[in-house]
């Protein structure tokens, strides 16, 4: 299929896009069933399905034109879904922050498309690595900026914090398997381009590693369950980005799939508690997991998987990613430290939900809200099989990277032990420091506002004043000058013309008055006049002769 004549491209399904489509379909089905149980209407379902269709186009696009189409619709639908409750000014404002932040980063993808036309003479994703210098580097820069913005990696992470003001089903869909994962997917897709530039692969690898570490610390400091899950999403996607840069495509994709199951499960559990208990605060959720067995058990499985506890899914997939970083001790150390933080913030959520205490008894959860939790919990537990040697080999062949190596036994054992020890330590200590810089997401929104938003608005106001006072003032001045000149010319020229016309009129009126005087109606006067005229004619004839 060719979308633009003369520019090969279109939609296609390969191993990577097939995995993403299946993941999208599974999470979408779970979210739609859950949302039906919460009573959402046609507008919500329509926006969600449009969003899912845009995501499907994004992951199957083979050229930048169709990729941009899906990318843009996905961004617009995310704005509408985050701000679904349009009567709430806070939620609409948060939707605007999320949209504008990702939209600003999306300009990189437009720039990359322009550079691809100039340098690669092709818009196909698999042709980008063949572009000549300096176009290849410019294309890579645009793609990296756009992908990091979409996936809420540093320095764009703060928009995901604001996006948590949206409904829980929206968070479960957008911020687990679709929109936030789309940036990581794009980096996995264009790994040959990143590797061809050299610097882009290194930048992406370290951007993912640093985000996994720093946002892990941010997640650990949170007092709100959805904020904790949001920061952990940034951190977990950091592992996918690290894999894309380091060339661990099989591990990065496995991390994406396992994270989608785990995080959609946790967001839906948070949505149940928010609906039943009316709170997201960790200190107010004491004992919440004990008040409904299904929800509590599902949340426990998801949190333990998020912690990387063996044999659950994220234990293995993180190791698959870190295997690609084995050549750099510094990168491996950062990745292991981020894994420890993952176990710590997951344990913090577990401790809040299962700690004895809290008022009230058991509550009833509608079947439509309970139904998706069980299969998602099973997936969160079972997807660890992607790391087993026979399954892992088949997985890599499916993705077209059969030569990738997996983690060594020592790494798998070390990460499992670290996760178990960390969870046990948090459960024993129970009190975790909450520094202000981490609680406020590094003040990154304030920094962006000070460095970008306020200067942009100040410049806009200055340009508006310049337009009003200089440009518009000049136009108005020219108009006033024209009016003045016209008025002056009118007074001088029109006065003379009017005077001439008036004189002619007066002369005509005078002649008319003179001509009326002989018209008396008396015959003898007419004869006398005729005689006078005849005499005058005779005199003229005599004189002329």
Image (cartoon, grey):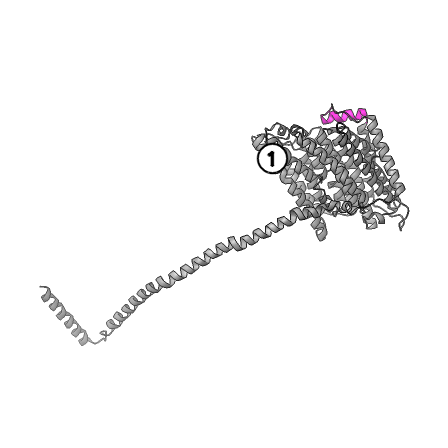
| Residue 126: x %, y % from top left | 64, 28
Q: Is residue 250 above or below residue 438?
A: above
Q: Is residue 521 magenta?
A: no
Q: Residue furthest right?
A: 356
Q: Nearer the viewer, residue 428 or 435?
A: 435
Query: Along the line of sight, which residue is nearer the eye, 437 or 402?
Result: 437
Please report the residue visible at 82 percent of the width from the left and 48 percent of the height from the top.
Answer: 281
User: Which residue is at the far front?
Assistant: 330
Residue under pointer 1: 113
Picture coordinates of residue 431 (x, y %)? 86, 45
Viewport quadrant of the N terminus: top right
Does residue 42 show up?
A: no
Q: Residue 25: which quarter of the image?
A: top right
Image-based side of 519 in relation to 3, left or right: left
Is 393 within the magenta? yes
Q: Along the horizontal axis of the image, is 17 left or right of 352?
A: left
Q: Quadrant of the C terminus?
A: bottom left
Q: Which residues are magenta?
A: 388-405
Q: Is residue 521 visible?
A: yes
Residue 290, x across and y down, in percent: 89, 44
SS for callout 1: helix
Picture residue at 66% right of the left edge, 31% below the top: 199
Query: Magenta stretch mostly in which secondary structure?
Result: helix
Left or right: where 278 falls relative to 399: right
Is 65 drawn above or below residue 388 in the view shown?
below
Q: Using the rendered view, name the quadrant where residue 228 is placed.
A: top right
Q: Rate crowding at label 1 as few (under 14), some (14 to 19) or many (20 or more) other CA atoms within 10 Å.
A: many
Image coordinates for residue 147, horizontal then vertical, percent: 68, 37
Q: Tell me the residue at 66%/46% (across/down).
A: 451
């Amino acid at each position: 299929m060719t979308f633009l004549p003369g520019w090969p491209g279109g939609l296609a399904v390969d191993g990577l896009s097939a995995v993403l489509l299946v993941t999208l379909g599974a999470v979408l089905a779970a979210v739609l069933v859950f949302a039906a149980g919460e009573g959402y209407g046609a507008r919500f379902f329509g926006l969600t399905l449009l969003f899912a269709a845009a995501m499907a186009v994004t992951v199957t696009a083979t050229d930048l034109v169709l990729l941009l189409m899906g990318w843009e619709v996905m961004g617009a639908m995310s704005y509408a879904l985050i701000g679904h409750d349009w009567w709430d000014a806070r939620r609409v404002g948060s939707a605007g922050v999320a949209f504008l932040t990702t939209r600003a980063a999306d300009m990189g993808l437009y720039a990359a498309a322009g550079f691809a036309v100039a340098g690669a003479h092709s818009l196909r994703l698999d042709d980008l690595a063949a572009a000549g210098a300096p176009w290849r580097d410019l294309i890579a820069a645009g793609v990296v900026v756009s992908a990091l913005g979409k996936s809420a990696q540093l320095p764009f992470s703060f928009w995901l914090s604001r996006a948590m003001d949206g409904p829980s089903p929206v968070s479960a869909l957008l911020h687990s398997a679709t929109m936030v994962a789309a940036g990581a997917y794009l980096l996995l897709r264009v790994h040959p381009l990143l590797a061809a530039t050299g610097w882009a692969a290194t930048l992406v690898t370290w951007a993912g590693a640093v985000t996994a570490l720093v946002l892990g610390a941010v997640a650990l400091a949170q007092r709100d369950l959805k904020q904790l899950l949001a920061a952990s999403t940034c951190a977990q996607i950091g592992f996918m980005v690290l894999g894309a840069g380091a060339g661990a495509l099989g591990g990065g994709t496995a991390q994406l799939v396992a994270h989608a199951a785990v995080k959609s499960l946790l967001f839906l559990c948070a949505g149940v508690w928010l609906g039943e208990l009316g709170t997201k605060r960790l200190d107010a959720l004491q004992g919440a997991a004990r008040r409904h067995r299904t929800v509590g058990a599902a949340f426990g499985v998801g949190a333990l998987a998020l912690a990387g506890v063996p044999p659950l899914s994220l234990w293995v997939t993180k190791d698959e990613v870190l295997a690609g970083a084995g050549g750099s001790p510094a990168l491996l150390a950062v990745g292991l430290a981020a894994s420890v933080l993952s176990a710590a913030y997951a344990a913090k959520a577990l401790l809040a939900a299962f700690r004895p205490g809290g008022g009230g008894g058991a509550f009833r959860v509608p079947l439509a809200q309970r139904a998706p939790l069980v299969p998602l919990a099973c997936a969160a537990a079972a997807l660890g099989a992607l790391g087993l040697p026979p399954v892992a080999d088949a997985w890599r062949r499916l993705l077209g990277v059969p030569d990738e190596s997996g983690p060594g036994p020592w790494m798998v054992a070390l990460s499992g032990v670290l996760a178990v020890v960390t969870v046990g330590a948090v459960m024993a200590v129970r009190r975790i420091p909450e520094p202000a810089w981490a609680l406020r997401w590094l003040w990154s929104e304030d920094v962006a506002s000070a460095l970008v938003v306020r200067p942009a608005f100040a410049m806009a106001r200055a340009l508006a004043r310049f337009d009003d006072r200089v440009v518009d003032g000049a136009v108005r001045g020219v108009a006033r000058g024209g009016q003045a000149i016209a008025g002056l010319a009118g007074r001088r020229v029109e006065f003379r013309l009017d005077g001439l016309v008036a004189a002619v009129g007066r002369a005509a009126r005078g002649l008319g008055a003179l001509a009326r005087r002989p018209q008396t109606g008396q015959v003898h006067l007419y004869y006398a006049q005729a005689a006078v005229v005849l005499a005058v004619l005779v005199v003229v004839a005599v004189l002329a002769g």
